[in-house]
Amino acid sequence: MTTSIIIGAIVIAALAVAALALALRGRDTSTAIGQLSGETVKRDKKLDVPEPGDTSNASAGKQVELAGSARGRAALVAAESAPPVAYVPPDPETIGVARRQFLNRGILGMFGLGLGGFGAACIGFLWPQGVSGFGSKVTVGRIPDIQAAIIAGGGFFYVPEGRMWVTEYPAAAVEKATTQYAFYGQVEQGLNAGVTAIYQTCPHLGCRVPECSTSQWFECPCHGSQYNRVGEKKGGPAPRGMDRFPMEVNAANELIVDTGTVIQGPPIGTNTTGQEAEGPNCISGAEEH
């Protein structure tokens, strides 16, 4: 059954090809102009073709044909004998831009446009911006206003714009800070003004550390690390005290905190204020490490 189908398909295909060839041939014949029959061709071959200008044995119609043929041959001979025409390059303004030139210029133009856009985007990304908020210098406020805010917050003042806590730093502890804080020079102006700026993140695993109003410490709810009010470690798994930011006080007595620079907190065992828990801890089970 399958063999019969294949043979039938081959026969049909052959017939279709033959029909197509005949149709194309018929079309060529029908559109041909001046096609001679076989008998005419044979009769013309038997005739002697006279020399140009010899019309003695030709009929009137044949004489006209021979005369025209002779003029054509004369014209051909004259054309062949004419000297070659010198090559004159075409005028570029007349030709204009060739297709290949247009495509090449278009490709190069698009390529240049793409590179220019990419370069502009890179420059815009790397160009320093006038940023504000976290990552820049934050003006917290005048020192008296900050101290009032600390008192109103029960010993703690949170500045969300800088992701930091600002607490009171005792004047009696400044002398100890000069010897126990390796970063003292970066925070000196703030400590002398009686405040310190502490980064809100726990140096253990990065949790946000809240205040504990009863103990007056910072106590991390994630793993129980505890810090006194100026961010020095008191207990838990943290590797150091809370990180902090550089501080400066301008001529208008305003505290300016550089949140773009994070200073590593003081090492374990640092205790410049001597502050112990002033009440129950919010996170139980923390031990001194």
Image: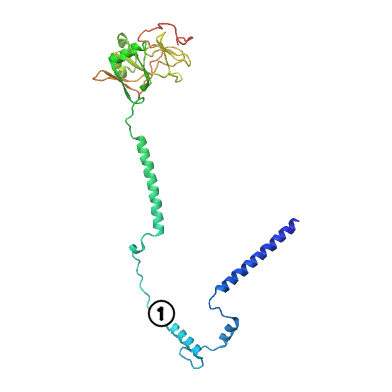
Horizontal side of 271 relative to 42 (left or right) equals: left
Instruction: Residue at 33%, 62% (x, y): give it.
Output: 93
Horizontal side of 81 relative to 249 (left or right) equals: right
Q: Is residue 33 above or below residue 282?
A: below
Q: Residue furthest left?
A: 251
The residue identified by callout 1 is 79
Viewer-side residue, 275 vs 272: 275
Q: Residue furthest bottom?
A: 56
Instruction: Residue at 30%, 8% (x, y): give it.
Output: 172
Does the image show residue 178?
no
Q: Position of residue 223 (x, y in %)?
A: 48, 15
Does the image show residue 6?
yes
Viewer-side residue, 36 vs 272: 36
Quadrant for the C terminus in the image = top left
Please tell me in which quadrant of the rendered image residue 169 appears.
top left
Residue type at numbered disc 1: Ala
- Label 1 neighbourhood size at 10 Å, few (<14), some (14-19), many (20+)? few
Q: Position of residue 41 (x, y in %)?
A: 57, 83
Viewer-side residue, 188 vs 118: 118
Q: Position of residue 105 (x, y in %)?
A: 38, 53
Q: Position of residue 258 (x, y in %)?
A: 33, 23
Instruction: Give the tally of numbered discs.
Output: 1
Q: How is the image coloured?
A: rainbow
